[in-house]
Amino acid sequence: MRDRSEEERRRWSVTKVGVEAEGENKLKLYSYWRSSCSFRIRIALNLKGLEYQYIPVNLLKGEQFSPEFQKLNPIGYVPVLVDGDMIISDSFAIFMYLEEKYPQHPLLPSDLAKKALNFQAANIVSSSIQPLQNLAVLKYIEEKVSPDEKIPWTKFHIEKGFEGK
C-alpha cells in the first residue's frame, strides 16, 4: 500500500454524519471550505443526516480549473454533488435534489406559503447577494474598473439584496 500525503488523505476522507446514501455510491461533495454556496450544501447534508465524501477544491489555488473538475462543472464553480451517475452543480439545484431524493428530515416547510417565502429568500441570496462576492466578479471589477471600487461596489449590491430592493 502506497503512503499517501496528508492532502491526499484529507481529499479522500469520508465525512460520516448519519444515514448512508442509497446504493453503494456515497454522495461526493466537491467543495471549498470558505464558499457560502458550498457551506449551504454541507449544512443541508448534515441536517438530513446523509453520509458524504468531502472532496476539497481550493479556489485560491485554481483547482476549479483542473481538467478533472472541469469535467464535472465546466464553469468551474463549487459546489458540485455527485450521486452515482448524477452530477449536479449550483447550490440551489443541489438543495432541491437532496430534498426530493432524500425526504427524511425535510428542510422545507410543508405549508405552501412558508415554502414560497423560503424560495424567495433563497433566490435573493443566490442571485442578488452571493454572486457579487465571488472571486471572479471581484477580480473583474478590480481589473476593469478599479481596485478601489471592489469593496464599495460589492457592499452596495449586497446591502441592496438584504433590503430586498
Image (tube, rainbow, N blue to C red):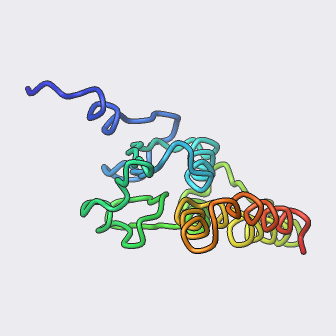
Frontmost residue, 78 versus 107: 78
| Quadrant in which the N terminus appears | top left
What residue do we see at 40% from left, 49% from top?
A: 57
Q: Is residue 17 above or below residue 35?
A: above
The answer to which image quadrant residue 43 occupies is top right
The answer to which image quadrant residue 117 occupies is bottom right
Q: Is residue 99 above or below residue 26?
A: below
What residue do we see at 61% from left, 69% from top?
A: 141
Residue 15 drawn at (x, y percent): 44, 35
Q: How many marks?
A: 0
What residue do we see at 58% from left, 67% from top?
A: 137
Residue 118 drawn at (x, y percent): 80, 64
What residue do we see at 69% from left, 59% from top?
A: 148
Residue 155 visible to an observer of this rendering: yes
Q: Is residue 154 above or below residue 57?
A: below
Q: Is residue 74 left or right of residue 31?
A: left
Q: Is residue 122 above or below residue 55?
A: below
Q: Residue furthest left?
A: 1
Frontmost residue, 3 versus 88: 3
Residue 111 visible to an observer of this rendering: no
